[in-house]
Image: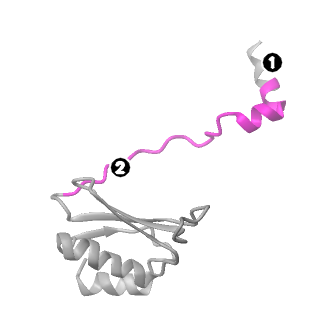
Amino acid sequence: METDCCRFVQRCPECQIHGDLIHVPPSELHALTSPWAFSVWGINIIEKILPKSSSGHEFILVTIDYFTKWVETASYARLTSFGVVSFIISHIICHYGVPHELILDRGVHFRAEVDTLVQRYSI
């Protein structure tokens, strides 16, 4: 009977659409730790928010301190690597000091200007 049920589910289009899609074995989780507050920051961008906000913004830049879990965010209508650098300087470096590490996803917004900032401050 179990074999019949498995065959039925495999042939059922609705079961395939709404079924559990986990086909990859779980991988080991790695904890991201920080030795002290504001020394390690993670940076990510939430892109193309639809619909746009009332001010026309469709990007959200999110940073999180891995020790305290403190979050700094800003929204943008158009986001460039220069905007990311300005955010890092004004919201992180000026408020909390130069971090020892920035964890980036290496997206399109994290290009030359961000690399220059990282080298200039020895992050």
Looking at the image, residue 88 sits to the left or right of residue 35; the answer is right
SS for dot 2: loop
Say if mark 1 contacts mark 2, CB within 8 Å.
no
Residue at x 54%, y 66% (from the top left corner): 54
SS for dot 1: helix
The amino acid at mark 1 is Asp
Looking at the image, residue 102 sits to the left or right of residue 80; the answer is left
Residue 5 figure quarter: top right
Image height check: is 76 above or below 115?
A: above
Q: Nearer the viewer, residue 6 or 49?
A: 49
Q: Which tag, 1 or 2, sits closer to the chain's start?
A: 1
Quadrant of the frame with the N terminus: top right
Image coordinates for residue 114, horizontal then vertical, percent: 37, 82
Q: Which residue is mark 2?
A: 30
Is 12 inside the magenta-drawn segment? yes
Residue at x 61%, y 39% (from the top left corner): 22
Q: Nearer the viewer, residue 67 or 21?
A: 67
Quadrant of the frame with the C terminus: bottom left
Q: Which residue is mark 1?
A: 4
Magenta region, mostly helix, strand or loop? loop
- Give the magenta part as a residue range: 8-34
Farthest-out residue, top: 1
Is 79 inside the magenta-drawn segment? no
The colour scheme is one colour
Image height check: is 2 above or below 8?
A: above
